[in-house]
Image (cartoon, rainbow, N blue to C red):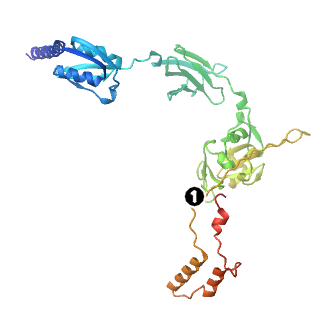
Amino acid sequence: MNDQLKRIVSIVIILCCFAGLSFAQQNTLTIDVENANLEKIFELIEKQTSYKFSYRNIIIDKTSDINLKVDQATISEVLQAILPQKGLQWNITSEKSIVITPLPHPTNSTDTPKKISGRITDDTGESIIGANIKVEGGTVGTISDFNGNFEIEVPENGSISITYIGYDTQLIKVDGKTHFDIVLRENAKELEEIVVVGYGTQKKLNLTGSVSMVTSDDLDSRPVSSVSSGLQGLLSGVTVVNVSGQPGANNSSIRIRGLGTIGNANPLVLIDGVEGDMNTLNPEDIQSISVLKDAASSSIYGARAANGVILVTTKKLNVKGAAPTIFVNAYYGSQTPTRLPEMADAIDFMKLDNEARANVGTGKAWTDQHFDHVINNTEPNYFGNTNWIAEVLNKHA
């Protein structure tokens, strides 16, 4: 009995839907307009039928460019003639309502991501574990597993970049392929790079401690006037904070892996093996900066290196007998005070000072004779009336 009732209800609902559509086709329209807009067309349809339109104002084009002439046309014929070219579609939801919505945008098949896979190895065929695979121009990424395999979704005409420490970065276009066998080449130049570590130098390939390095090229690419400011954001585990925003105050606070001691938390700074302040150096004179961050620094320099060590190597002329080369890199600027206090003159100052002393029960500091000296300018060396803030700062400093 219940199944039969469900079938009856379903048939009734379907018939009601067809009844609404047939009702819409039975309404005929006669319209003859030139240079009309959509709202005008909707208004004419509502006057000749019992339908009401429902839409968002933001999707309706207000341009008056519709020329329409129909006679005894159905609502569907009229709407089909004007709405698609405006990027709109309609849906008759009942005998009294027509809903206008934007046409769906066609999907671009080239932008549809598809899954690709691959295996990453080195020159000897050994799997590379933990290589970074990233979709160029996006935020999707993954890493290779224990066997060097990976899977990632990439647009059909997209590209992926593969990076790994000590190897050259590779950029690969997908071009419709679904599987890639990728061989990474060792970056010999990076592994052979010389790093200053304590009382000597060592290749990065042989390093076991945590050492970061900044070269002169890194500092030259930054428009800074102090070395400490140039280190901001260049070294992992090194925090550089400006202690003052005053013009010319370029000294910064440097912390290596947080606070290592209760007292002075500044790292040990050695300039060509001599303890000093690296902010006294011109960034143009620095060849490289090495930062020792772990216990290996304490084993070399002792307790002074508890907060890390910064080793600064300056540039030297390595060619014997060669003439020195001089480079000039200068900058200039102006400093303008944003707010200056309005200064009182000498007479007002003397009056206010006497009044303040009277309020606390002490005698006057300035007599009538003192006032005469200021007014008559008889003792300019002792009783002057100069606004020194205006004289010293003027408009620019």
Task: Give whichever of 325, 23 is nearer the camera.
Answer: 23
Q: Residue furthest top?
A: 72
Q: Is residue 318 left or right of residue 240?
A: right
Q: How many numbered marks, from 0 up?
A: 1
Give the quadrant of the N terminus.
top left
Q: Amino acid at mark 1?
A: Thr
Task: Give whichever of 239, 327 is nearer the camera.
Answer: 327
Q: Residue furthest right?
A: 321
* Tag 1 residue: 338
Is residue 395 positioned above or below 74 on the image? below
Q: Is residue 162 left or right of residue 22?
A: right
Q: Is residue 137 visible?
A: yes
Which residue is rendered at x = 61% and y = 21% of the image?
Answer: 121
Name the spot of residue 305 as percent of width and height, x first. 68, 52
Name the spot of residue 130 as percent of width and height, x first. 57, 28
Give the SS element for disc 1: loop
Name the spot of residue 76 as percent of width and height, x first. 24, 14
Which residue is rendered at x = 67% and y = 19% of the image?
Answer: 124
Q: Quadrant of residue 79?
A: top left
Label 1 Cα neighbours within 10 Å, binned few <14 / some 14-19 / many ≥20? few
Q: Quadrant of residue 92?
A: top left
Q: Is residue 191 left or right of residue 152?
A: right
Give the quadrant of the C terminus.
bottom right
Q: Quadrant of residue 125?
A: top right
